[in-house]
Amino acid sequence: MSPTDRIREHLLSSAGQLSDTAERLTGPIVRASECMSETLLQGGRILSFGSGVNSVLAQYLSILLLNRFQRERPGLPAMNLNSDAALMNAIAMDHSFDEVCSRQIRTLGQEGDALIVICGLDGDRGLTETITAARDRALKLIVLDNEVGASSDVLLESNDIGIHAPAVSEAGCREIHLSIIHCLCELIDVQIFGDTL
């Protein structure tokens, strides 16, 4: 396969997966944005955590909320639980890697906050501990994962929001999660600040 054909195949596959996402996940994305907006309007914070490479997406979400998405507006309170590498290493060494997120939630999470967890195809090793900690601290819960593994499904309750990306590869899953993050930020801006500032 030539480089040109390979690029075309990748881009067309991505477009197809995003089209599938639009057909199947619009409802959960809207619910997640409403949950996040309600959290922020009631004085809560958006906490984010991503497993493995998905930590970059979780950090990016916090940046877009704290700073700005596509327009100028006041910053929104968000905290990324992947940002402190020394803390994460200490928790992993002293306790367990599976507790890197849950120990932070138990210390920093406050009732009324919302937690977004982003997992890839292989899920998140500490997802059970993370969800348990979120419930113990009365956090609202949103999980972005992949429908292939959908490891979160058995752990989620009726008030939780699961958004399962329809992708068959890690790269495809991350592309969809990135688009979902952009959708969430756009909807939050409109829900909190209106169509124009």
Image: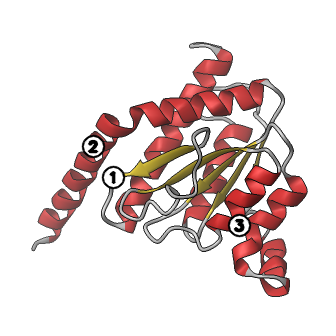
Task: Report the label total.
Answer: 3
Q: Is residue 117 above or below residue 2?
A: above
| Helix, strand or loop status at disc 2 | helix
| Residue located beneath label 3 in the image | 129
Q: Nearer the viewer, residue 153 or 145?
A: 153
Q: Nearer the viewer, residue 26 or 132?
A: 132
- Measuring from the top left, give residue 3's x and y in whole percent: 17, 70
For residue 166, the mark is 1
Mark 1: which amino acid? Pro
Q: Nearer the viewer, residue 190 or 51?
A: 51
> Could you tell me if residue 168 is visible in this image?
yes
| Residue located beneath label 2 in the image | 20
Crowding at mark 1 (Cα within 10 Å: few <14, some 14-19, many 20+):
many
Whichever of labels 3 and 1 marks the residue nearer the N terminus, that label is 3
- Measuring from the top left, give residue 128's x and y in whole percent: 65, 65
Distance from disc 1 to disc 2, alpha carbons, whole Å, reads 7 Å
Mark 2: which amino acid? Asp
Q: Which callout, 2 or 3, points to the residue nearer the camera?
A: 3
Distance from disc 2 to disc 3, alpha carbons, whole Å, reads 31 Å
